[in-house]
């Protein structure tokens, strides 16, 4: 065999072996780089899934809708399942990692959809709260308006009532003796006389009216006799000394009442109170001596 030929074959073999070893080394390096890349991609994917799970949990806490809350819970469980599957997937399993990435994008899309629904519901709730607040405000305004009207009506009614109230003007009381002369001595007094005028009032109710007079002694005792009785005043039954029934037509009406003395009286100041239509319409006093 030619020596040169053997050397050439040997050299070719060495080059072939060297090239193969270089290829093997290059492939191993490429595989190592891909494996490292897939491992990093897997780690990033796990982190993304974990962050997504946290986002779902956070949105779940802000939702007040049972149906939407259940859908979020279902997605959270799905993410948790995918995370567990990803942890068990080998870094070299590029096909499964790629599939899990696609599922991650799908879940993200679902999250965006639910987030839009949550925002929409929150806007609706805010609008409803604002409308409810406005309605409550309007109701309160109506109540305040009604209260004001009621107060005005009460005041108007009170004014009308006061306007319709009879008034005793020129009210005076005097004591007279048996000759019908005025006296300040109880010793000679036979009668107490009360004079006054019911003032004209076009708003007052016309017709027959009872006029009541209460005579109070200096000791605040009420003078009464067999003809005395009671009348209604301020929600209570009050005793009177004497009364007179008059016809009132809205014009000035002169009234005089006589009290016949029939008992021993003490000196001092006597009070005379006049009532009509359940109201106190006048008062006067008279100082008497022994």
Image (cartoon, rainbow, N blue to C red):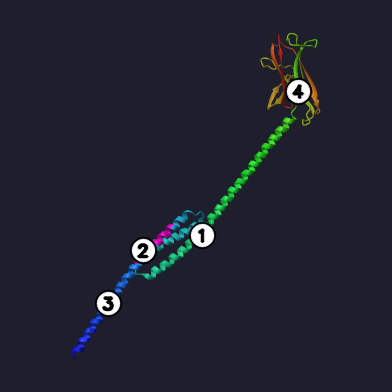
Can residue 119 be seen?
Answer: yes
In the image, the segment drawn in magenta is 39-54
Residue 93: x percent and y percent? 36, 69
Question: Which quarter of the figure has residue 57?
Answer: bottom left
> Would you say residue 182 sits in the magenta stretch?
no
Are dots 3 and 2 in contact, CB under 8 Å?
A: no
Q: Under tag 4, what secondary structure?
A: strand
Real-space Cα distance between discs 1 and 2? 29 Å
* Mark 1 nearby-residue class (10 Å; few <14, some 14–19, many ≥20): few
Q: Under tag 1, what secondary structure?
A: helix
Real-space Cα distance between discs 4 and 1? 82 Å
Q: Earlier in the sequence, mark 3 or mark 2?
A: 3
Real-space Cα distance between discs 3 and 1? 56 Å
Q: Which residue is mark 1?
A: 116
Q: Residue at x 69, y 24 (%)?
A: 237
Question: Which quarter of the figure has residue 153?
Answer: top right
Question: Which quarter of the figure has residue 168?
Answer: top right
Q: Which residue is mark 4?
A: 169
Q: Residue at x 48, y 61 (%)?
A: 112
In the picture, the disc for residue 277 is none
Main secondary structure of the magenta stretch: helix
Q: Viewer-nearest of labels 3 and 2?
A: 3
């Amino acid at each position: 065999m030619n020596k040169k030929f053997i050397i050439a074959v040997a050299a070719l073999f060495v080059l072939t072996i060297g090239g193969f070893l270089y290829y093997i080394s290059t492939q191993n390096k490429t595989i190592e780089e891909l494996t490292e890349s897939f491992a990093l991609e897997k780690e990033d994917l796990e982190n993304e899934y974990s962050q997504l799970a946290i986002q779902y949990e956070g949105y779940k806490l802000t939702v007040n809708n049972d149906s939407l809350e259940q859908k979020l819970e279902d997605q959270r469980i799905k993410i948790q399942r995918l995370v567990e599957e990803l942890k068990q997937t080998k870094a070299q399993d590029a096909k499964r990692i790629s599939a899990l990435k696609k599922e991650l994008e799908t879940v993200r899309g679902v999250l965006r959809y639910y987030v839009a629904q949550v925002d929409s519901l929150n806007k609706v709730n805010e609008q409803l709260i604002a409308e409810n607040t406005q309605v409550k405000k309007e109701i309160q305004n109506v109540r305040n308006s009604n209260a004001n009207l009621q107060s005005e009506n009460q005041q108007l009614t009170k004014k009308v009532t006061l306007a319709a109230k009879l008034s005793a003007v020129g009210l005076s009381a005097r004591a007279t003796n048996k000759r019908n002369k005025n006296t300040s001595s109880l010793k000679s007094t036979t009668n107490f006389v009360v004079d006054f005028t019911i003032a004209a009032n076009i708003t007052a109710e016309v017709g027959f009216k009872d006029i009541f007079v209460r005579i109070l002694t200096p000791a605040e005792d009420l003078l009464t006799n067999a003809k005395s009785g009671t009348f209604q005043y301020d929600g209570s039954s009050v005793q009177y000394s004497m009364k007179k029934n008059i016809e009132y037509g809205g014009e000035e009406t002169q009234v005089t009442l006589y009290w016949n003395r029939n008992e021993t009286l003490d000196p001092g100041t006597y009070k005379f109170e006049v009532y009509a239509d359940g109201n106190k319409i006048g008062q006067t006093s008279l100082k008497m001596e022994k």
